[in-house]
Image (cartoon, helix red, strand yellow):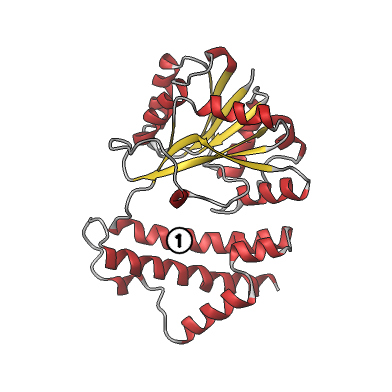
Amino acid sequence: MRATIQLCTYNRAALLERVLDACFEQSVEPDSYEVVVVNDGSQDATPQVLEQARHRATCRFIVVDQANAGLAKGRNAGIERACGQRIIFIDDDVLPLPTFVAEHLRAHDRAPLAIVRGGAINVESFDDLPPPVWSVKDYSGNYFWTTNVSVPLATIRAVGGFDESFAEYGWEDIDVGLRLRFGGVKAIFHPRALVYHYKPRPRSGDVLKMIAQARAQARTAVKLLALHPHWRTRLATGINPLQRGMHAVSRAMGRRTDPGKLGDLSYDHVLSRRELAAARSCVTAAYFEELERALAART
């Protein structure tokens, strides 16, 4: 088997049916690839969606159920069950184009040992998709970004897969990327291995989740730096004198992390531009505030 599409899912039943159908509708031969889904303890209708997908699957389709344990453990469960020579990681909010697997394999034919980073077009809805033409505005410089990336299965297994001590949100794929980079594995960018990435405009009810996620990401950033004390890590995480200094000044000037200062979030609505800018400022402030706490706790 030439390829495995691997994704983890948690409480994304509303999107998952479309995502899986796109995975099944690939232009390559059905017996040349498989789809491995890890259900990370979803509490919504995900089990029913997966059961229905079994009857529509046109390729080998494997479902792994686990208690909620996070992406790192879920990815490793998927790696363990994978049979493809190449494993292609996507997320449960990603819609692959029909040529997605074929383009990843085409890139690997040119660079058999490399990481292949695909392109992603950010969209607010799967029902109103723009033309499938990638542009630089959607570029991500991440070396190993599991929204759309592939690597030889033997290579990811050789580096030990994902570090399951990354139990909170953030950086588990960056950790893998750094280990692969420092191990001499090259990465190439192939934008024609294309997906649509669901990125809806945040709503009022999302603000507290965004702040909690930022704080978790700050804590895992400190863990990442402990594992990889390298300038790339310091630049990516903001754990460097310039960024820490700038945000220390912001805190001293009274920059608030209290979402109550953003306005009335008590009713459900899409954030206005002003509210979104204020929310993002609040999220950034929360990240650096938590970062300082985590760094102090570690020392």
The residue under the point 72% across, 45% down is: 180
The location of residue 277, given as percent across then percent down, is: 34, 67
Which corner quadrant of the image does residue 253 belong to?
bottom left
Mark 1 neighbour class, 10 Å CA radius: few under 14, some 14 to 19, many 20 or more:
some
The residue under the point 42% across, 84% down is: 254
On-image quarter of the N terminus: top right
The residue under the point 59% across, 51% down is: 142
Dot 1: element: helix
Report if residue 63 is visible in the image. no
Q: Nearer the viewer, residue 217 or 97?
A: 97
Question: Is 91 left or right of 107, judged from the image as shown?
Answer: left
Report if residue 9 is visible in the image. yes
The location of residue 250, given as percent across then percent down, is: 47, 81
Q: Nearer the viewer, residue 21 or 37?
A: 21
Question: Is 18 left or right of 172, judged from the image as shown?
Answer: left
Question: Is 284 left or right of 183, judged from the image as shown?
Answer: left
Which corner quadrant of the image does residue 60 belong to?
top right
Three-letter amino acid code of the residue under disc 1: Ala
The location of residue 4, given as percent across then percent down, is: 59, 26
On-image quarter of the C terminus: bottom right
Figure disc tally: 1
The residue under the point 37% across, 29% down is: 18
Which corner quadrant of the image does residue 258 belong to?
bottom left
The location of residue 35, given as percent across then percent down, is: 53, 24
Residue under circle 1?
212
